[in-house]
Image (cartoon, rainbow, N blue to C red):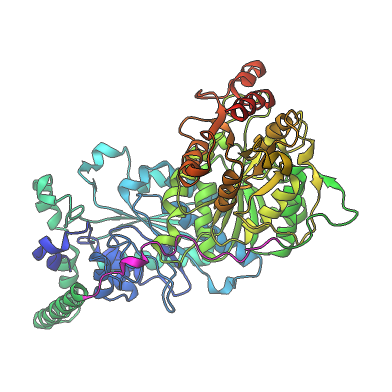
C-alpha cells in the first residue's frame, strides 16, 4: 500500500497521511491479540493494526482520499485516524492527531471496564482489555505520565504499546529524551514492562500474546516497548529524503518484511510461493486503490451534521416547586442532584480532586457521597486536570456515565487539550458514533477575597470550543434541573457553578436559595428565563430596557433594578450554549435598549460578541447602542477585597449604566 501511495504521490498527497512502513510486524502482532469485546486507542501510523483486525485496504483508502465511504469519519479525518463500532471488531473511539493524548481516554476506557465489572454491568469473565498504541516520541508528553500514574494507581486492564523508531518528525531520540519508554516506565510501580524487537514478527507476536495474557489474567497494566525502523516518510508532507541521510540505509537492514520472509522459508514455504502471494497482493491492492479513488466524495450538504447527538431532555418536566418543600442552597441542590443520579443510574460515578470520602469537596458539594455509594463510585484523583477531563471520553465509550469536577475554574487549563482535541470533536468527526457523555462541574467566579487563582471567570474561552454545551445556573432550582438534564445529555456539558451563590452568603444573593424541586424535575439546556418582567405601562411609554445576564450578574441586576421600578426586564440566560437567542432577540426588539452584564472582563468577551450579534439582528429596533458592562480589563482578580470590588461589577455600577442607557 505504501508503495502505491508513493508511486501515485501527486494524487495520494492531496491529504496528509502516514503509513506503518517498518512497523508492520509489531502492529500485526498487536492486532492478533485483540478480541471483539476489547477496546483500542491507536495512533496515526497504525494502519497495519487496522488491516490485521480485518479492515480492507479500500476502507483505509477511502479515508486517504477523504471519501464518503470512509468508515471512520466520512471524509472528515486524516488517513489512519480510526473510529470503529462494528460487530466482530474491537471498539475504537475517536482518535485525534495530538500525539500521546489518546493515552488518557484509553486509560479512561480501562477505568470504565474495571468499574462496570465491579458494578455487575460488564461480565468479568470476558476479561476485556484496552490497547493503547503510542509512538515513543509522544511518551515525553505529561499527559502520558498522568495516564500511566492512574493505570497503576487503580490497577487497570490496559496494554500500552510504545513503537520506538527513534524519530519524532526530524528530531532524533537523543535530542528528545534521556531514556526510552521502557526505562521511563520503571518509575511507575506496578507497571509490568516488556521489551521486544518490533521488526521480528515471531518475537512480536509472542510478546504481545504474553502482554495480553498478563493484562487479562492479572487485571493490571502492561507496557511493551517495541523497537522498529521508520522506513516510510514521517508523513506525506515531511518526506524522508529531506533529513534522514545515512539513517534510512541503516534502518532498512531491520525491515520486518525480509525478516518475516526468511522465517517463512525456514519454516517450509517455498520462495516461489511467497513471490506468487506477493503478486496476488499487488493486484488486489491495486484494485482496492482504484476502487477507493473512484468512490464518491461526501455530500457537501452534510458538512454540519453530527455536531451533537440528540438529547432526550427537550422540555421542562417534573415539579419545580413541590408543595411543602423547603428552601435549599445551591450547593445542596447540586449535591442532592448528584446523589439522586447515583441512586438511579448504576453506571454513574463521580471523581475529581478532594471529592472523596475524607472531605467531600472543598465546598462540601460532594459531602458524604463516598460514604453512601462507596469509594469505587466516588473517589479522589491525583492533581491531574487533563486526566479528570480526558478520561471521560474513554469512560463514555465503554458505557460509564462520568460526573467529574475541576476544583476551581482557574485550574481548568491543563485539561483544555483533552477537552478540545479528544472530547469536543468526537461526535462530529466520528459521524455521531462516539458522542462523549460527560458532565463536568466547575466552581467559578469571585466570592470575596479568593484572589487571583480562585476567583476567575473562564466562560468566554470555553465558548470558543465548538461541540460542548455550557450551563451557568444562578439559583438552586435551576442547578438541580440543569444538572439532571446535563447528565442525561449524550454530549459533553460543563456546568459553571458560582461559588458566591453556593450558600447565598454574599449580600443580595438570598434569592439563590429556592424551594427544592422534586426528584423528577429537569430543565432543558438552552432555555433562558425572564427573571424580572418590566411594567407593561412603562414598556408602552418606551421607558424600559432589558438586562441580559447570568450567574452573579442576576443579583447585581436585581439590586440595581430596585432603583428603577417597572423599567427593567432581567433575563437569566441559565445556559450559555446552546443560547436561547430567540428570547433575547424578542426582548431586545421589544425594549429597544439592552445592557449585557457579565463578571468577566468585557473586552473581547462572550458578552461583547453577544452584543454585536444582537446589534446586527435587532438593528432597526434599537433606540441606543447595546451596552456591555463587565469587570475591568485586568489579568487576574486581586486578593484584597477592596481591590476586588474596584475590579468587578456591582449594583452601583449597574445602576449607573442603566441610568445612562435610559437617558439615551
Give the image location of residue 379, x and y in percent: 65, 49
Q: Position of residue 345 (x, y in %)?
A: 69, 64
- The residue shown at (47%, 47%) is 617
* Drawn side of residue 337 relative to residue 229, left or right: right
The image position of residue 1, as x and y in percent, is: 18, 69
The answer to which quarter of the image holds residue 50 is bottom left
Q: Is residue 306 left or right of residue 626?
A: left
Q: Nearer the viewer, residue 512 or 438?
A: 512
Counting labels gives 0
Q: Residue at x 50, y 67 (%)?
A: 216
Residue at 51 percent across and 33 percent down: it is 625
Q: Is residue 579 visible?
A: no
Membership of 304 in magenta stretch: yes
- Does the stretch in magenta take in 9? no
User: Which region shows up in magenta?
Assistant: 295-316
Q: Where on the picture, by quarter, is residue 400?
A: bottom right
Q: Quadrant of residue 594?
A: top right
Amino acid at each position: 500500500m505504501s508503495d502505491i501511495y508513493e508511486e501515485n504521490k501527486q494524487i495520494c498527497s492531496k491529504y496528509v497521511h502516514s503509513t506503518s512502513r517498518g512497523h508492520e510486524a509489531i502492529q500485526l502482532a498487536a492486532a492478533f491479540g485483540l478480541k471483539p469485546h476489547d477496546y483500542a486507542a491507536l495512533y496515526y501510523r497504525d494502519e497495519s493494526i487496522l488491516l490485521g483486525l480485518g479492515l480492507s485496504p479500500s476502507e483505509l483508502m477511502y479515508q486517504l482520499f477523504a471519501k464518503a465511504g470512509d468508515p471512520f469519519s466520512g471524509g472528515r479525518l486524516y488517513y489512519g485516524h480510526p473510529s470503529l463500532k462494528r460487530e466482530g471488531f474491537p471498539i475504537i473511539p475517536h482518535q485525534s492527531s495530538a500525539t500521546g493524548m489518546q493515552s488518557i481516554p484509553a486509560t479512561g476506557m480501562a477505568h470504565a471496564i474495571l468499574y462496570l465489572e465491579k458494578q455487575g454491568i460488564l461480565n468479568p469473565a470476558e476479561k476485556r482489555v484496552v490497547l493503547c498504541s503510542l509512538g515513543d516520541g509522544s511518551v515525553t508528553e505529561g499527559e502520558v505520565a498522568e495516564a500511566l500514574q492512574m493505570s497503576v494507581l487503580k490497577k487497570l486492564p490496559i496494554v500500552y504499546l510504545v513503537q520506538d523508531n527513534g524519530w519524532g518528525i526530524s528530531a532524533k531520540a537523543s535530542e528528545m529524551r534521556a531514556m526510552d519508554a521502557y526505562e521511563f516506565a520503571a518509575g511507575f510501580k506496578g507497571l509490568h514492562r516488556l521489551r521486544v524487537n518490533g521488526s521480528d514478527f515471531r518475537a512480536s507476536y509472542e510478546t504481545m500474546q504474553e502482554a495480553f495474557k498478563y493484562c487479562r489474567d492479572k487485571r493490571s497494566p502492561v507496557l511493551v516497548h517495541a523497537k522498529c525502523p521508520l522506513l516510510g516518510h514521517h508523513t506525506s508532507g515531511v518526506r524522508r529524503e529531506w533529513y534522514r541521510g545515512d539513517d534510512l540505509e541503516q534502518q532498512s537492514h531491520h525491515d520486518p518484511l525480509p525478516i518475516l520472509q526468511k522465517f517463512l522459508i525456514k519454516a517450509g514455504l517455498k520462495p516461489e510461493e511467497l513471490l506468487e502471494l506477493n503478486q496476488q497482493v499487488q493486484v488486489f491492492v491495486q484494485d482496492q486503490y482504484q476502487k477507493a479513488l473512484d468512490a464518491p466524495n461526501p455530500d457537501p450538504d452534510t458538512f454540519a451534521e453530527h455536531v451533537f447527538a440528540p438529547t432526550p431532555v427537550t422540555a421542562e418536566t417534573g415539579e419545580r416547586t413541590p408543595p411543602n418543600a423547603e428552601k435549599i442552597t445551591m450547593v445542596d441542590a447540586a449535591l442532592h442532584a448528584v446523589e439522586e443520579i447515583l441512586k438511579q443510574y448504576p453506571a454513574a460515578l463521580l471523581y475529581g480532586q478532594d471529592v472523596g470520602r475524607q472531605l467531600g469537596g472543598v465546598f462540601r458539594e460532594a459531602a458524604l457521597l463516598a460514604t453512601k455509594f462507596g469509594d469505587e463510585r466516588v473517589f479522589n484523583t491525583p492533581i491531574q486536570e487533563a486526566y479528570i477531563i480526558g478520561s471521560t471520553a474513554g469512560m463514555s465509550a465503554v458505557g460509564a456515565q462520568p460526573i467529574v469536577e475541576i476544583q476551581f475554574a482557574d485550574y481548568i487549563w491543563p485539561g483544555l487539550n483533552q477537552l478540545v482535541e479528544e472530547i469536543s470533536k468526537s461526535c462530529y468527526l466520528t459521524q455521531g458514533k462516539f458522542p462523549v457523555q460527560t458532565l463536568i462541574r466547575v466552581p467559578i467566579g469571585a466570592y470575596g477575597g479568593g484572589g487571583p487563582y480562585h476567583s476567575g471567570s473562564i466562560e468566554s474561552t470555553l465558548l470558543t470550543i465548538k461541540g460542548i454545551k455550557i450551563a451557568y445556573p444562578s439559583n438552586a432550582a435551576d442547578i438541580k434541573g440543569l444538572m439532571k438534564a446535563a447528565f442525561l445529555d449524550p454530549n459533553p456539558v460543563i456546568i459553571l457553578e458560582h461559588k458566591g451563590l453556593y450558600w447565598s452568603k454574599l449580600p443580595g444573593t438570598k434569592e439563590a436559595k429556592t424551594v427544592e424541586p422534586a426528584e423528577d424535575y429537569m430543565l432543558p439546556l438552552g432555555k433562558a428565563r425572564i427573571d424580572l418582567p418590566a411594567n407593561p405601562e412603562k414598556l408602552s411609554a418606551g421607558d424600559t430596557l432589558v438586562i441580559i445576564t447570568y450567574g452573579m450578574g442576576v443579583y447585581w441586576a436585581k439590586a440595581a433594578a430596585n432603583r428603577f421600578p417597572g423599567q427593567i426586564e432581567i433575563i437569566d440566560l441559565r445556559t450559555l450554549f446552546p443560547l436561547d437567542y430567540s428570547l433575547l432577540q424578542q426582548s431586545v426588539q421589544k425594549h429597544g435598549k439592552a445592557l449585557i452584564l457579565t463578571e468577566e472582563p468585557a473586552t473581547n468577551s462572550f458578552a461583547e460578541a453577544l452584543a454585536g450579534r444582537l446589534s446586527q439582528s435587532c438593528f432597526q429596533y434599537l433606540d441606543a447602542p447595546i451596552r456591555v458592562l463587565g469587570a475591568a480589563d485586568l489579568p487576574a482578580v486581586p486578593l484584597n477585597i477592596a481591590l476586588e470590588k474596584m475590579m468587578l461589577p456591582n449594583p452601583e455600577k449597574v445602576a449607573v449604566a442603566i441610568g445612562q442607557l435610559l437617558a439615551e
